[in-house]
Amino acid sequence: MTLPQSLLQALTQAAGFDRTAFEAVHTAGEQVTSIRWNPFKKIEGPSLFSHTEQVPWCPDGMYLPERPSFTLDPAFHAGAYYVQEASSMFVWHVLDQLIGKETAGKKILDLCAAPGGKSTLLNTYFKDGLLVANEVIKIRASILAENLAKWGSSNVVVTNNDPAHFQSLPGYFDLVMADAPCSGSGLFRKDPDAIAEWSEDNVQLCSQRQQRILADVLPALKQGGILIYSTCSYSVEEDETIADWLVDEMGMEPVPLTVPTEWGIVETSSPRHSAPAYRFYPDKLKGEGFFIAVFRQGQASMYKKQKEQSLLSPSKQEMQLLADLMPLTTEMAFFKQGDAIRGISAPWLTGLKQLASSLYIRKAGTEIGHLKGRDIVPSHELALSLLPLDHLPSIELRMEEALQYLRRKEFQANADKGWNLVRYKQLPLGWVKVLSNRINNYYPVEWRVLKD
């Protein structure tokens, strides 16, 4: 692996950079694999991973001794865990230190969210908050929606908007996570193809784009709110220089963190304002290249009461169909979108109406089912959700049977007629409808496993 000489030369001035060790770790060929468990979805019985080592800065993060075929693990498709790079899990430590247990009622924006690693982490931490996960690229927004559906929470809204669109929500969010698009040098070890795409010109373009993204979104952060800025780049122009720009141009106040020295994370600071920031080098810790810095919004809040878009409510008859499918509680609020009925955590219905008046929403809450005549067809999102479904008939499958289901192929099972949840190690995978002579597989066609 030949690293760009111009990058290596530029990094001689970066805090903590050791060229010999840095080059050695990139040529060694070692790959680090890590996952983060979903604490709300417990696997019954042994999992695919029997020997793990904890990621020190995230309680749910685990290193694996080798990379298995996640595609062939039904628990992965059930949302029992997310395959996430260990360094980026440091966001949990940031939240733990600055937010603590005061999560109720918080509104969070993950601005550049796809494919969903940080979104699922934020959703876990703010389990009683509202997460808006945004992705500007349409096809990536679909992947983001899929991964958040698997995670199972009903207090999530997935949007497909440019950062500038959030200016219509001044002072709205308590926290903004901006994992900005970057030149990607921190991923060289994981993805050697990224080396060919790297250039000094691209670093400069990325730096300018990062400034535009931040300038566009910061009006949506309330006064005293927190900005977490991160990249997977080593370049100072995309890291410490942006920290200085945030102080100079955007009036942001740097926030220091306490980081144990044994973690191997390098504490750095911006050249003009000494804004504290943190660098992750793969020769110093078990993870890929990463940069993170935290700021507080110092500008006066421009918050104003938000407009609300009305949402169509289900009829009494439709609510009765819903009641036949799942217990109805005051914890959930229901609304219609086309022929689908969706549910969101009740405290966030007003928030959804406010967001819907300004943004393009790709997914809101959990899709419960589709109306079909006088019947309701349960949705795949419902099967993967954290909503109570234990009262429904279910079929427990072994590994190979579960994979057949995930491939949308036929399998045999003894079950009651009608709708049944398909489970693997007690984790719901989706729906089947048992008829007198066959079992209809309702796993989404676009999600099916193609690998044998």
Image (spheres, rainbow, N blue to C red):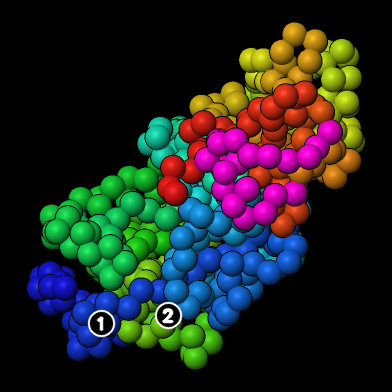
Query: Which residue type does callout 1 highlight?
Result: Ala
For the magenta stretch, what is the residue range? 396-416
Q: Image quarter for residue 29?
A: bottom left
Q: Is residue 93 above or below residue 160?
A: below
Q: Is residue 406 visible?
A: yes
Q: CA distance from mark 2 to mark 1?
A: 14 Å
Image point 72% across, 57% down: which residue?
Answer: 425
Image point 44% across, 49% down: which residue?
Answer: 452
Query: Which residue type does callout 2 highlight?
Result: Lys
- Who is closer to the viewer here, 149 or 98? 149
Q: How many marks?
A: 2
Number of other residues with Cα within 10 Å of mark 2, as a class: few under 14, some 14 to 19, many 20 or more: many
- Who is closer to the viewer here, 422 or 301? 422
Q: List x then y, in percent, for residue 368.
A: 73, 30
Q: Is residue 222 visible?
A: no
Tell which residue pokes out farthest to the top in this image: 373
- Was residue 412 drawn as part of the magenta stretch in this picture? yes
Residue 437 left/right relative to 285: right
- Label 1: state its secondary structure: loop
- Label 2: state its secondary structure: loop
- Who is closer to the viewer here, 88 or 450? 450
Name the mark on residue 209. none
Image point 40% across, 35% down: which residue?
Answer: 139
- Was residue 221 drawn as part of the magenta stretch in this picture? no
Which residue bears the numbered disc 1?
28
Number of other residues with Cα within 10 Å of mark 1, as a class: few under 14, some 14 to 19, many 20 or more: few
Tell which residue pokes out farthest to the bottom in this image: 262
Which of pointers 2 and 1 lies earlier in the amino acid sequence? 1
Image point 21% across, 79% down: which residue?
Answer: 27
Q: Quadrant of the N terminus?
A: bottom left
Name the mark on residue 286. 2
